[in-house]
Image (spheres, rainbow, N blue to C red):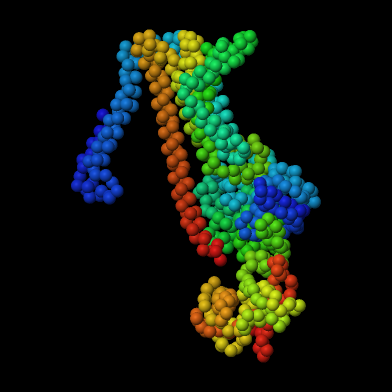
Amino acid sequence: MAGTIRRKITPGDVRSQRGTEESVWVRWLLIGAGGVVASVFLILPLVNVFWQAFSKGGAAYLSAISHPDTWAAIKLTLLVAVVTVPLNSVFGVAAAWCIAKFEFPGKALLTTLIDLPFSVSPVVAGLMFVVLFGLQGYWGRWLQDHNLRVIFSATGITLATVFITFPFVARELIPVMKANGSDQEQAALTLGASGWQTFWRVTLPNIKWGLLYGVILCNARAMGEFGAVSVVSGHITGRTDTLPLRVDKLYNEYNGAAAFAVASLLALLALVTLGLKTALEWRTAALQDRAQAVGSDADKSEADNHPSNAT
Amino acid sequence: MSIELRQISKRFGDVLAVDDVSFTVAEGELVALLGPSGGGKTTVLRMIAGLEMPGGGDLLIRGQRVNDVPVQQRNIGFVFQGYALFRTMDVFSNIAFGLSIRKWSKSDIAARVEELVGIFGLEGLERRLPHQLSGGQRQRVAIARALASKPGVLLLDEPFAAVDAKIRQELREWLVRLHHELSVTTVFVTHDQEEAMEVANRIVIFSRGRLEQIGTPREVYEQPVNEFVARFIGVMNVLELKVQDGAARLGELSFPVHGAVDGQTLRIGFRPYAVKVSPLPREYPCRALLKHVFFLGVMLRIELETPDGLVIRARISKEDFARLNLVEDQPVSFYIREYRVLGGDGAFTGQSSAIVPPGFGEGI
């Protein structure tokens, strides 16, 4: 099992023990417990997804994935992500820019609104769209008269997904932008740059890692969202099923192997996302370490400053 | 390039940050905006740059009203307090930024950056990122970047605040030399009067949004227009004394004044260098106890306490201190060569005279 630690406890370890540390036995016990929990609840299920997916052999796996309805679901999921992620990236950058760099009335309200999709249950979010755009909804009649379809279509699914994944990019960027301040932007202006030039050449390079992180999270959620999408999609096989809905449907049809085969695609996406996220975190940490290594010298000289300032 | 401010004011919410300020900076001058923090000097600098809009008044650069000219078109170079170097760009790209915005050709940019790198002693650092530079290097990059497209005005916000004391001294001298060579009109903000005195041709002194005085370092030191300036530029002793028989006095201290009424209270100001001290208790008319000695390098500051409990700060050279053989808690005598009567509203009346005790010449 992954949680097992194979290391002999030598007397030296006991001697090196500091006052603030738990005893060796408590430490191994806690680490062991953590490892067991992680294995049972995280690693085993994930392995099981792939295990079940291939339970009827590779041919069955391939045929499940290449089924036309699954293909339709993959395409729809990709379509939703392709529309949602750029939309929310632009929105997230704009909102974070407003909140981090300007003072205006209603700023607190905007900050709260950005968090709204996190606090509302996805099912309720889906219902909100049905109330607005459904046949019995406020704008349903008008939409039908103009031959437009929102609910039970890719449009509604995309709308719901956009709503659900609203906060990811903005939430990532607000602290980054606040920390950067607006000095560099002002410097660009004094050097003759227009607002757009400043954004593309100064702001964007400064936030790119935070932005990428937000985009990855946003994409993962856009492809994996179930609740809100389930309410507005209408579950029309081959037309309004996204990958998560397809998995749910196959499973309910007692087609376990096919359900797990499709689920393995989503699981794979999750693993790739996690890998990218970790790589980004390592990179950010490395950058910070470098900045700190240089920054500590600067701190020292700041401290030297004070006595001379007093004269 | 000449800069002119006519009755400029600026309000932030309820706070009047800049209040009816007018002054002129001539072509090629090196001017310091000096004042305590919150005095409005940075706001004035940012208004000249176009980073803040004046609330009222006219701002002219070379005779042209620029109130509505956006920052990009004012042709100024601005050096920010924290330098605001572009974090993700190396030294070359930082300096080249304004040039590439102005669509210079690649070869022109390379030539200009190389020239600046030479002037600013940044050779070999072109590919470094800002966080790989020392404080002094960062500042030089910031100034090089500001000067790259040959602006008519260079504006610096607290240029020496972020570097340590030793480098600061070098940078001051270097800025004076740089200004001498490039003769670009330069305005910088500082809260350090010593820095302003040493670097600037002229000093503009601000306090609470108002312009208190403008003049050469010598003028503001020797002829301060009011008590604030006198106290802010260097050290000043201020005593509050009652008038009796034509002189403001307390104990042995006596400052002859003209046209004062007996019983009136006057404020008398004098610089520490105007206090002459002798170790002989009877040499000068006033007696005191030498309470403290502060070593400031070439000069020493000493604090005298009169029998009436007044504390008087004096300045004395290291040589005189050694020659007079002064020690703490020793009785001494002193007189004041030069003083001014401070007006009730803080403005000087301009009256200045010297007390020379009968029978004694100048010096100790």
Relative depth, front residue between B246 and B5:
B246
Q: Residue at x 75, y 79 (%)?
A: B258
Q: Residue furthest bottom?
A: B359
> From what the image shows, is residue B218 above or below residue B71?
below
Q: Residue at x 52, y 73 (%)?
A: B294
Q: Residue at x 61, y 82 (%)?
A: B251
Task: Give the left or right position of residue A204, taking residue A194 as reference.
Answer: left
Quadrant location of the C terminus of chain A in the rendered image: bottom right
Q: Quadrant of residue B350?
A: bottom right
Relative depth, front residue between B122 and B271:
B271
Task: Give the left or right position of residue B213, taking residue A155 as reference.
Answer: right
Q: Residue furthest front?
A: B263
Q: How many marks?
A: 0
Rendered location of residue A30, percent (x, y): 27, 37
Quadrant location of the N terminus of chain A in the rendered image: top left
> From what the image shows, is residue A16 above or below residue A105?
below
Q: Residue at x 48, y 16 (%)?
A: A231
Relative depth, front residue between B133 and B76:
B76
Q: Residue furthest left?
A: A11
Q: Quadrant of residue B362?
A: bottom right
Task: Give the left or right position of residue B219, taking residue A228 as reference.
Answer: right
Rendered location of residue A38, percent (x, y): 31, 30
Rendered location of residue A116, percent (x, y): 51, 28
Q: Is residue A2 visible?
A: no
Q: Is residue A277 visible?
A: yes
Rendered location of residue A74, percent (x, y): 47, 16
